[in-house]
Amino acid sequence: MHTPLLSENSSSYDLVIIGGGCAGLALAMAICKRVTKPSHAPKTLIIEPRAQYIDDRSWCFWERENKVNKNLVAKSWPTWEFGTKLEQHKHSSKSGWQYNYVPSIRFYDQAEQLISKHEQITLLKNTRVTGVTPNPSNVEVTLDSGSISAEQVVDTRVPDSFDMNKATLKQIFYGIEIELTTKNAIEDIARVMEDMRADSDGFLFNYILPIDEKSILVEVTRFSGAPLAPETLREAALELANHISDQSKYKITREESGVIPMGVAPQVEAADPRWVRTGIGVGAARPSTGYAFQRIQGWADMCAKTILASGQCQSFPSDSAKLAWMDNIFLCTIRDDPTLAPELFLSLARNVKPDRLLRFLTDCPNRTDVLAVIVSLPKWPLVRTVLVDLFRGLSTRKRGGKWRKAL
């Protein structure tokens, strides 16, 4: 759905969304679903640099209640597994949690279909934003083909000031979807962290999803302090595909890769409330896991609600201080000694009940859940990280004072 260069009558908008990816389209879809009539939607323009969408990624998440459109979910698993070569733990929920898989092309297609039914909302593809300038009366958005004005701007791009090197860890992944010529023989469970291990470049694990009888998504994921290229994992992903297929013939139907920042600096309050940032670059992904899809959907619904009620956009909410601190300690422990990571994750899988662990991983733990997670983990590595963290904080504060005595 590519709109030609905008006419003079289309130069001013209530809302401009920069980026038609997961966050941008999620917000547009949330607005569409919340308005009682298509004509009641704010005049909205979504600007997307891609000329067309392809099936370029997968989004997965745990969910108990159906908050995401069922038509988006291509496959759900009631059982998932964590493990090393020597120890595996299968988890199933007693209260209906499932692990869901959403192929990106299904999300893109449904978003375009929904947007096409709302004449007030336009998706402009093959167009780039080259500048955003807040003015007293509006926000000017400069395109590679002209300029427009907006009352509110939601910017899903990674900010220019974002430095991937400053993320505590980088989640680097390379995935390959294969189609076998015969029915696959692997168990129909989501292997979310299999063969956890460490090497000189960090912590690794395999990720395996049997999508249907013949299709399997295999992925190798690394947590590393260094910003390594995803392509460094392609050979390992191919070896995993060969192993999973048991050397049977298969064809590669698609490949996906990326780097997700784990543990980014706290968000800085927007200088102009009419220009709101969201997305991976401002903390959309949970620091300790890298999962972002559900968090983005929740933000999109909240933001759509406030836009329709008051015309004001909402920035991405910060994590609670408690969860942010726990995630930071966890990530720093792995960064400082990746060999500890398999046992840290195994301790959670081994000692925390599935429902408690899922509430913690999906940002909705109660106090008992948090306590169960703390009790389950090996103490000394985390205590050591806490002490180092406190020492660094003390050193920073003293360096900022009147004297600079080295500690």
Image (cartoon, rainbow, N blue to C red):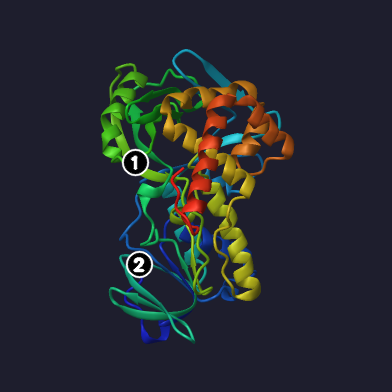
Q: Is residue 6 visible?
A: yes
Please state the horizontal and vertical placement of residue 223, each as a whole percent of the image. Answer: 40, 35
Between 267 and 83, the residue placed more toward the observer is: 267
Is residue 174 shown left or right of residue 213? left
SS at circle 2:
loop
From the viewer's perspective, is the residue at label 1 or at label 2 nearer? Answer: 1
In the image, residue 295 above or below residue 77: below
Please state the horizontal and vertical placement of residue 25, each as a whole percent of the image. Answer: 47, 59
Q: Quadrant of residue 108?
A: bottom left
Amino acid type indicated by mark 2:
His
Residue visible at 55% across and 59% down? 316
Please state the horizontal and vertical placement of residue 163, each as a whole percent of the image. Answer: 36, 53
Please state the horizontal and vertical placement of residue 91, each as a whole percent of the image. Answer: 60, 24
Rendered-image quadrant of the N terminus: bottom left
Between 114 and 187, the residue placed more toward the observer is: 187
Identify the residue under disc 1.
256
Mark 1 or 2, nearer chain start: 2
SS at circle 1:
strand
Between 310 and 172, the residue placed more toward the observer is: 172
Identify the residue under disc 2.
2
Amino acid type indicated by mark 1:
Glu
Residue visible at 31% across and 36% down? 253
Q: Is residue 61 visible?
A: no
- Crowd class of label 1 (few under 14; some 14 to 19; many from 20; radius 10 Å): some
